[in-house]
Image (cartoon, rainbow, N blue to C red):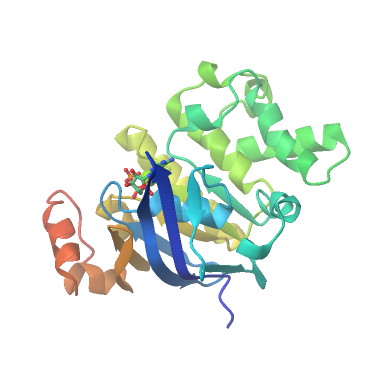
Amino acid sequence: MTPLLSVENLTVTYARNDAERMAVDSISFAIEPGEIVALVGESGSGKTATGLAIMGILSANARVGPGSAIRFEGRDLLATPERELRDIRGRRISMVFQEPAAALNPVMCVGDQVAEVALVHGERDKRAARTKAIEMLGRVGLPDADERYRAYPHELSGGMRQRVMLAIALLLRPALVIADEPTSALDVTVQAQVLALLLDLQREAQTAVLLITHDLGVVAETCARALVMREGRIVESASVDDLFHAPAHEYTRELLAAMPRIVRPA
Ligand SMILES: Nc1ncnc2c1ncn2[C@@H]1O[C@H](COP(=O)(O)OP(=O)(O)OP(=O)(O)O)[C@@H](O)[C@H]1O
Ligand SMILES: [Mg+2]
């Protein structure tokens, strides 16, 4: 089977104060259709940079190194013109960010922000886009979705905002969702709800998910396979069972040891 996504020798550097700093250092991995893969690692290890590179939305001071390739649904995204990438983003690949308040437009009602995804991707009928948005907001568990459609982000709780982000990310049933710490800004009970919701929708639409997290408890509960990053490199790529029971890399053992609270799979 051809993987849905294959990342080959991806390198990302950031320019800062005239120096180039390596954030992602020739990593390679693949994701199959419908698969959930965790990307774990300590702060600064390059997880978000990897996600942003796949989405093609790295900041202006970032460079993707020569020799890097990101293949998705048969095309090399790094060689794809921005105009086409804009069509792919939101429709075939989407990203959920850690801080929904920062990712949402503060002066646009949340419903319109969901409907906009449909409009940008070819829906001509505003009313149809609105209906689709309300339906999706309901699906992601926003209570009274038709009334909350008109709410502004600041009028919603953090958990509700993250549900809105999920509605935006999942509206067009993309083949791949990059979820970057999608629950870490939420309190624990809401975290579990939002994660369960993401997985429900994932199962239903057979969406592949790259789940970026530093919570190994979340990994144990949701993923079959994990990639462990450290200082820009993938130091371990293993099934979650192997990762927890027989971690091959010293760093993975350290990560596990640093998380005494986790519930390990039996
Ligand atoms: N816009 C930027 N400009 C300069 N350096 C950056 C920028 N964004 C990230 N970096 C650097 O790139 C490296 C990787 O950052 P990245 O955000 O990918 O880490 P991360 O694994 O997502 O960490 P966290 O768990 O804290 O989110 C870090 O050293 C970071 O300081
Ligand atoms: Mg990050």
Horizontal placement of 202 versus 114: left or right? left
Q: Quadrant of residue 98?
A: top left
Residue farthest to the front, as pictured: 18
Q: Nearer the viewer, residue 89 or 238?
A: 89
Residue 40 horizontal/vertical position (percent)? 32, 57
Residue farthest to the right, as pictured: 124
* Residue at (75% x, 51% y) in the render: 83
Horizontal placement of 243 versus 138: left or right? left
Horizontal placement of 106 versus 237: left or right? right
Q: Is residue 61 visible?
A: yes
* Residue at (45% x, 31% y) in the render: 159
Residue 1 horizontal/vertical position (percent)? 58, 83
Q: Quadrant of residue 166?
A: top right
Q: Is residue 173 above or below residue 161?
A: below
Q: Nearer the viewer, residue 154 or 53?
A: 53
Residue 6 horizontal/vertical position (percent)? 53, 71
Q: Nearer the viewer, residue 71 or 138?
A: 71
Residue farthest to the bottom, as pictured: 1
Residue 104 horizontal/vertical position (percent)? 57, 29
